[in-house]
Structure formats: C-alpha cells, structure tokens
Image (cartoon, grey):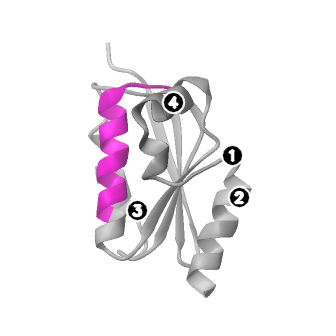
Amino acid sequence: MAAVLTLTHLHLPGVTVISVAGELDITNHAEIPVYLGMNRQRPADQVVFDMAGLAFMDSSGLRALLSCHQDCVSLGGELRLAALQAVPARLMEITGVRAHVPVHTTIDQALSVAMAKISG
C-alpha cells in the first residue's frame, strides 16, 4: 500500500516554500522533484521544505531531497529543510546529509536565512 504524501506550496518574494506531510518513501519519492519543478516560481529561487508534517522518510525519500538540493544549487538557488521530526531528523544525522543541506530547527529560521540571501 502506498504511503500518503501531501505537498502544498506558498510563494514569497524569491522564496518557494513547500510543505511536506505524511510519509516519504519508495512508493512516492518521485513526487518531490516533480512537485518542486512545477511549483518553483523561478529557477534560482530559494526553496524551503517545511518538514513539520513529515512523520517518516526512508532512504529513497532522502535521495529525492538530495536530488532537489542539487537541482536548486545548479540553477543558482538553494534548498533548506526546516522543522524535521524525529525519524527524518535521525536519518539526516546518521547519513551526514546535514553537512551538505542546510537544516533549520524552525520554518521561521529557514525563511529568515532564505530572505537574507535574496536581499543580500
């Protein structure tokens, strides 16, 4: 049975916020890069993934996030993750991904840094 994944987005000036909720795994990981591609305002936008509603993520979900990160960087933007819950946070920690992808405790912190990048 496929895991339930809900994606929504919000556009701020120069920043695309994508809220990720439910479970991100082998059954739905391909939705993440497709959704980002369809909903990013401009290629060089700062992108913040609000992960507050994501209860579970496996290695295929992690791979999808890394692909999105590489895509954002190659287009002149940046991807940030915010508000990771216990299981996704642990996966990021044990794989060392935090050294490569900016991770913020709260969505407000991530947005503050993303907005500063735009203005500055």
Q: Which residues lie in the magenta part?
A: 55-71
- Residue 55 visible within the image: no
Q: Where is residue 32 in the image (x, y as percent from the top left)?
A: 35, 45
Query: The disc labelled 4 sits on which kind of residue?
Result: Pro
Distance between mark 4 and mark 1 Cα atoms: 13 Å
Q: Quadrant of residue 51?
A: top right
The residue identified by callout 3 is 39
Distance between mark 3 and mark 4 Cα atoms: 23 Å
Q: Which of marks 2 and 3 is nearer the N terminus?
A: 3
- Helix or strand or loop: what does disc 2 sit on? helix
Circle on res. 88: 4
Q: Quadrant of residue 30?
A: top left
Query: The disc labelled 2 sits on which kind of residue?
Result: Gln
Q: Nearer the viewer, mark 3 or mark 4?
A: 4
Query: The disc labelled 1 sits on which kind of residue?
Result: Thr
| Residue 24 sits above or below residue 83 on the image | above
The residue identified by callout 2 is 109
- Residue 35 visible within the image: yes
Query: The disc labelled 3 sits on which kind of residue?
Result: Asn
